[in-house]
Amino acid sequence: MNKKKLKNIEWRILIYVFALLIIGLIALYSASTSNEFFEFKKQIIWILVSIPLLILTMCIDYKILARFSWLFYIISVILLILVLFTEKINGANSWFNIGSFSMQPAELAKIAVILFLVNIICKLRI
């Protein structure tokens, strides 16, 4: 990352995020003593995976995301249609299960819809 990108980072937000991570880990640690800290270990793994993704996301120019927002939107709609044909979990078809990994495409669709609508609104100058 160059100095210009480091200068534009909202450091207070990052500090708040890491503070919330620590508070959440402490709460999860105290609540997960009965199952050999399985949930705590899983949360640590997700944090270790998400921090590099956070850094990568900070390096991506938002104009590139806006340019490909239509593609993200189409992919999310396709995933939402495909999830209708999955096995029901607790009475709902809303998850993709791939081995031990589960994904809910509605969460990705929220971001894709926001990016797509913002791009359309900016192009129309409403």
Image (cartoon, grey):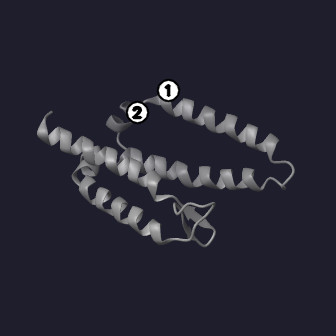
Task: Indicate which disc residue 115 carries.
Answer: none
Within 10 Å of disc 2 (Cα), the crowding (few <14, some 14-19, many 20+) is: few
In the depicted structure, whether residue 96 falls above or below residue 64: below
Could you tell me which residue is drawn at 22 percent across and 44 percent down?
119
Seen as rendered, the residue at the extreme front is 91
Question: In this figure, which residue is indicated by the disc labeled 1?
Answer: 12
In the depicted structure, whether residue 45 falls above or below residue 4: below
Seen as rendered, the residue at the extreme right is 34
Could you tell me which residue is drawn at 50 percent across and 52 percent down?
52
Could you tell me which residue is drawn at 39 percent across and 65 percent down?
81
Could you tell me which residue is drawn at 47 percent across and 29 percent down?
11
Q: Is residue 87 visible?
A: yes
Within 10 Å of disc 1 (Cα), the crowding (few <14, some 14-19, many 20+) is: few
Seen as rendered, the residue at the extreme left is 124
Task: Indicate which disc residue 9 carries.
Answer: 2
Type of amino acid under label 2: Ile
Q: Looking at the rendering, which quadrant does residue 45 occupy?
A: bottom right
Q: Is residue 61 visible?
A: no
Q: Position of residue 85 (x, y in %)?
A: 47, 72
Q: Position of residue 46 (x, y in %)?
A: 61, 53
69 relative to 10 in the view: left or right? left
Distance of label 2 from label 1 (alpha carbons): 9 Å
In the image shown, does 90 or 21 lie closer to the viewer?
Answer: 90
> In what quadrant of the picture does the C terminus appear?
top left
Classify mark 2: helix, strand or loop.
loop
In the image shown, does 114 or 38 lie closer to the viewer?
Answer: 114
21 relative to 73 in the view: left or right? right
Classify mark 1: helix, strand or loop.
helix
Type of amino acid under label 1: Arg
Number of numbered labels in the structure image = 2
